[in-house]
């Protein structure tokens, strides 16, 4: 089908048919879905008629080869022009084979494996009929109170951008038309949804444009540079205007400046939410504002369907805007090959073979192991052979380890920690006891746990948050573990056995007490379907931990936001001439994170030589090399993540203390050394100046190399222009 044919198709469409292409409703509205498209109750009250559904353009949340085929077939029978439906769904970190949550994937620093996970998610989703995934979510995050930090890869714009690209490549592959095992990506939530005030979901975002461009926009841009077909708007305001009605953001920045010509979809009901945001008095005004601002598809509300016709007929909104949006939507259908092959990719038999296949689970297991971060280890891990292990805690036998965005994942199919350990330990070496539930507990449960611990050599204590405690609408003002779990830990501590705490959760927590009372801590996040296997292999030393934090863990919630790439201030703590009191600090907690960005331990040790620069003068158009020798000085093989940071010592505007510019994951066998070479160019030193132009400053820079943002060796150079 040519572009010309698409234009002719749009010309043939009635106003109602065109408008309905811009509507997205959930699967139950559609005939052929399990709910059989019964339009009753609230749906009828919303103003949905059979005719609107017949003309509609896309479906939210349908999957399963059989159901999707039936929905598409029923639709094509009644749609006058035979325009197929687009099937969209949230395939965020796996379809049925669930990978670790994205924040955990961020901690793997493994870009290739992240791409592979998206490719597998696409393969499983597409065989089940999905065409578009609402992913990747690339909102930069600094506030662990926000429950959705688990959907992001973390606090750094460079690392987030690398992952954004990897996810888009994995989802989309090279050619969506011929490769039906891929799905179109929809990067979200545009823009700066991660910066809601106070970490409260859906809350106001207000920041300088410089900060927006510098920190928050790069990952969306990276996803678009990689070819993401769609963008989803955010719920929040950006500079006083809700993102979903923000013309400057969508038509200005996204379309004109960045040249994005794909489909822009609102988040769930975000068009109608222009009313409570108080920028529209009613649905009609909301529809006019959203379309004018650039939203093509309205998700789950009906402002467009109920009001665009009148708005266009009264010439309050130009029909050209509607036609453009329709063309973009039809263009995506064409690219996905849906006009020729409306059942693209769906196959009931292959569905059985592909979904949750052994190779997919193997990747999930590998990625889960690489995503866990060893935060503390006082010589108790790995577990020693012969040791008797008491596995205790609400996550000892709990399948709620998939995370809040694992729509199609099955908790029953998830490998629990107990299952993982049981496969590898003789029965007399493993005992188990719950101790308490996530938020409540009984004296009897506690006593049983103490009894179990008393008969063992070491306690593995599996604590955490259930999946409802993070994710969307999962903000918390207290980011400690629930009190009952602290009580369990304290009671076990009194027995005097070493305690290895394994955490299953979706956000950086306040771990001060856990740190004090545990001999080792392994942050396992929500590790996904293969979680129990991965964590067991790490605990037993079959796999050496290699995860590094991609988001800082604060000492306390009062310190939030705490992130590594912050500014120095005019009165930094610890400066040679600093006064004791009148410096930027808290009186009761340190300024730095408890566990900073880039941090993570291994069962082996690494040593770093001195960084050496090929020249200490860098000129535009040229490059300098920074080399450093990294050695595995322990007696186990291990992976080290060598991190390169840069600081502009005197910028036109204030520059962060450190900015990640490059990193390399290097596998070193025990005793092995390698020289790591990074290349530095002038382009990497550019940033948004006060007039928002991208430029670098001539002058002094410091480069830092090391295993973590807070543990680095430095070398200086100058940029000479
Ligand atoms: C979320 C989006 C998601 C959409 C569709 C919204 O509530 O904010 O991230 O893609 O629902 O499920």
Image (cartoon, grey):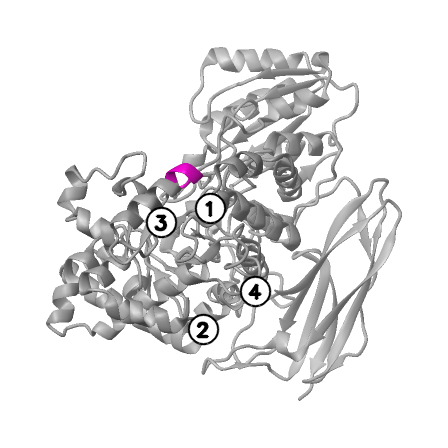
x%, y% of residue 650? 60, 78
Within-10-Å neighbours for mark 4: few <14, some 14–19, many 20+: some
Q: State the residue position of label 4.
A: 572
Nearer the observer, disc 2 or disc 1? 1
Separation of residues labelled 3 and 4 (CA atoms): 32 Å
Main SS class of the magenta portion in the image: helix
Separation of residues labelled 4 and 2 (CA atoms): 23 Å
Sequence-first tag of 2 and 1: 1
Separation of residues labelled 1 and 4 (CA atoms): 44 Å
Q: State the residue position of label 1.
A: 91
Nearer the observer, disc 3 or disc 4? 3
Give residue 619's quadrant in the image.
bottom right
SS label for mark 2: helix
Labelled disc at residue 210: 2
Q: State the residue position of label 3.
A: 201
Whether the residues at callouts 3 and 2 have beta carbons within 8 Å, the answer is: no
On-image quarter of the N terminus? bottom left
């Amino acid at each position: 089908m040519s572009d010309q044919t698409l234009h002719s198709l749009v010309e043939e469409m009635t106003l109602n048919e065109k408008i309905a292409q811009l509507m997205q409703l959930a699967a139950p509205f559609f005939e052929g879905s399990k709910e059989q498209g019964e339009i009753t109750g609230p749906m009828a009250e919303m103003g949905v008629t059979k005719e609107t559904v017949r003309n509609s353009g896309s479906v939210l949340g349908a999957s399963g080869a059989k159901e999707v085929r039936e929905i598409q077939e029923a639709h094509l029978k009644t749609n006058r022009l035979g325009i197929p439906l687009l099937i969209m769904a949230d395939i965020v970190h796996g379809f049925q084979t669930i990978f670790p949550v994205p924040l955990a994937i961020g901690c793997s620093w493994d870009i290739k494996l992240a791409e592979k996970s998206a490719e597998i998610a696409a393969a499983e989703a597409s065989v089940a009929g999905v065409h578009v995934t609402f992913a990747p979510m690339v909102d930069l995050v600094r506030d662990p109170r926000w429950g959705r930090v688990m959907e992001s890869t973390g606090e750094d714009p460079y690392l987030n951008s690398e992952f954004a690209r990897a996810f888009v490549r994995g989802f989309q592959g090279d050619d969506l038309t011929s490769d039906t095992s891929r799905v179109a990506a929809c990067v979200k939530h545009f823009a700066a949804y991660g910066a809601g005030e106070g970490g409260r979901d859906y809350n106001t975002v207000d920041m300088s444009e410089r900060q927006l461009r510098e920190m928050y926009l790069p990952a969306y841009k990276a996803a678009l540079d990689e070819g993401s077909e769609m963008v989803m708007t955010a719920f929040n305001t950006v500079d006083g205007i809700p993102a979903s009605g923000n013309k400057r953001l969508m038509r200005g920045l996204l379309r004109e400046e960045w040249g994005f010509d794909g489909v822009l979809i609102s988040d769930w009901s975000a068009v109608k939410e222009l009313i409570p945001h108080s920028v529209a008095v009613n649905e009609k005004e909301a529809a006019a504002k959203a379309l004018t601002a650039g939203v093509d598809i309205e998700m789950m509300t009906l402002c467009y369907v109920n009001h665009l016709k009148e708005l266009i007929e009264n010439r309050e909104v130009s029909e050209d805007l509607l036609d453009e949006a329709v063309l973009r939507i039809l263009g995506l259908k064409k690219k996905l090959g849906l006009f020729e092959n409306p059942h693209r990719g769906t196959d009931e038999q292959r569905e059985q073979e592909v979904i949750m296949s052994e190779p997919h689970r193997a990747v999930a297991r590998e990625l889960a192991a690489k995503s866990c971060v060893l935060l503390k280890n006082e010589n108790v891990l790995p577990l020693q052979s012969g040791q008797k292990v008491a596995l205790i805690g609400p996550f000892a036998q709990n399948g709620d380890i998939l995370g809040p965005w694992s729509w199609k994942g099955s908790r029953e199919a998830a490998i629990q920690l107990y299952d993982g350990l049981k496969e590898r330990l003789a029965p007399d070496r493993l005992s188990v006891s719950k101790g308490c539930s996530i938020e409540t507990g009984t004296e009897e449960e506690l006593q049983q746990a103490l009894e179990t611990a008393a008969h063992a050599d070491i306690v593995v204590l599996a604590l955490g948050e259930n999946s409802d405690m993070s994710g969307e609408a999962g903000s918390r003002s207290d980011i400690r573990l629930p009190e009952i779990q602290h009580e369990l830990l304290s009671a076990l501590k009194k027995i005097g056995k070493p305690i290895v705490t394994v955490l299953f959760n979706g956000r950086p927590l306040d771990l001060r007490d856990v740190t004090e009372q545990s001999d080792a801590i392994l942050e396992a996040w929500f590790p996904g379907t293969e979680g129990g296997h991965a964590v067991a292999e790490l605990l037993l030393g079959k796999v050496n931990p290699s995860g590094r934090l991609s988001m800082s863990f604060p000492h306390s919630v009062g310190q939030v936001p705490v992130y590594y790439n912050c500014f120095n201030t005019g009165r930094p703590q610890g400066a040679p001439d600093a006064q004791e009191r009148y410096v930027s600090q808290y009186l009761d907690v340190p300024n730095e994170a408890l566990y900073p960005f880039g941090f993570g331990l291994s069962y082996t040790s690494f040593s770093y030589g001195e960084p050496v620069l090929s020249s200490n003068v860098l000129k535009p158009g040229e490059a300098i090399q920074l080399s450093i020798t990294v050695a595995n000085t322990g007696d186990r093989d291990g992976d080290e993540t060598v991190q390169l940071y840069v600081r502009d010592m005197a910028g036109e505007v204030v520059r962060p203390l450190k900015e990640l510019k490059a990193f390399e994951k290097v596998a070193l066998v025990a005793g092995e050394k390698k020289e790591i070479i990074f290349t530095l160019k002038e382009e990497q030193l550019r940033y948004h100046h006060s007039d928002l132009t991208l430029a670098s400053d001539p002058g002094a820079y410091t480069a830092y190399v090391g295993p973590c943002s807070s543990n680095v060796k430095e070398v200086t150079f100058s940029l000479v222009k």
